Image: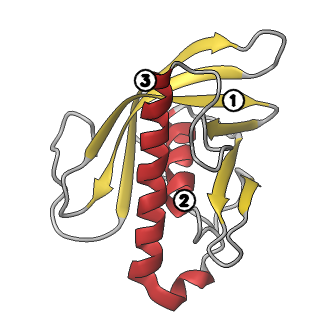
Amino acid sequence: MQLDDVDVINGSGPFAVDVADVRFLARFPGSDEELWAADIQAGRRGSVCQLFKSVLFVEGSGVASIYGIASPDGYPKGLADGRALGQQAFIAFLRGESARNERLFGPTVRMFSSHGYSSELLATRAYLSARESRLDAGIGYHDTTTGEYILRIVEAEREDAVSVQPRS
């Protein structure tokens, strides 16, 4: 799937993510963290894909994450409201898709270690794949059993959660 191709994926099926126009924006002052941006197209087969322009990612200490994912409400601190609301909308979209995966798979979803954050992880790994990076993925999600907000690092070498095929 390419951003230029089509805006509707045929049939029905899994959630898919495509990443384009990955670019370095800045280094955080006094930190090893870097701010990156990418355009993300995401959706399910049979549905119109959503295009999110200039989604922000943070990289540092061997981990990459969607900027704002560490906050339970997905609202990144330190950004202008318009930009922060865009990040929050993207994170809410991904969280909604993860919840939809849970409904679609039913009780069998618990077989997958990433069931509570599958879409967030897929988007982060797609970004990392577009960057040809082996950084770990930083994820934040609400545990559906306890209601607790959990921050997790998913190692780049783990293939049991979600695998992303590099674009050729």
Res 158 label = none
Res 82 label = 3
Q: Classify mark 1: helix, strand or loop.
A: strand
Residue 24, percent across and down? 56, 16
Residue in the picture at 43% in, 72% down: 101
Residue 66, percent across and down? 58, 38
Residue in the picture at 54% in, 59% down: 163
10 Å crowding of disc 1: few (<14), some (14-19), many (20+): many
Q: Quadrant of residue 19?
A: top left
Q: Pick whichever, 158 or 49, lies toward us.
A: 49
Q: Name which residue type carries label 2.
A: Ser
Disc 1 versus disc 3: nearer the observer:
3
Residue in the picture at 52% in, 18% down: 80
Which of disc 2 and disc 3 is earlier in sequence? 3
State the separation of the CA atoms marked 1 and 2: 20 Å
In the orientation shown, which residue stands out farthest toward the bottom?
Answer: 107
Write down the residue under mark 1.
59
Which of disc 2 and disc 1 is earlier in sequence? 1
State the separation of the CA atoms marked 3 and 2: 32 Å
Q: Classify mark 2: helix, strand or loop.
A: loop
Residue 144, percent across and down? 62, 74
State the separation of the CA atoms marked 1 and 3: 22 Å
Q: Is residue 151 above or below residue 127?
A: below
Write down the residue under mark 2.
163
Q: Is residue 127 visible?
A: yes
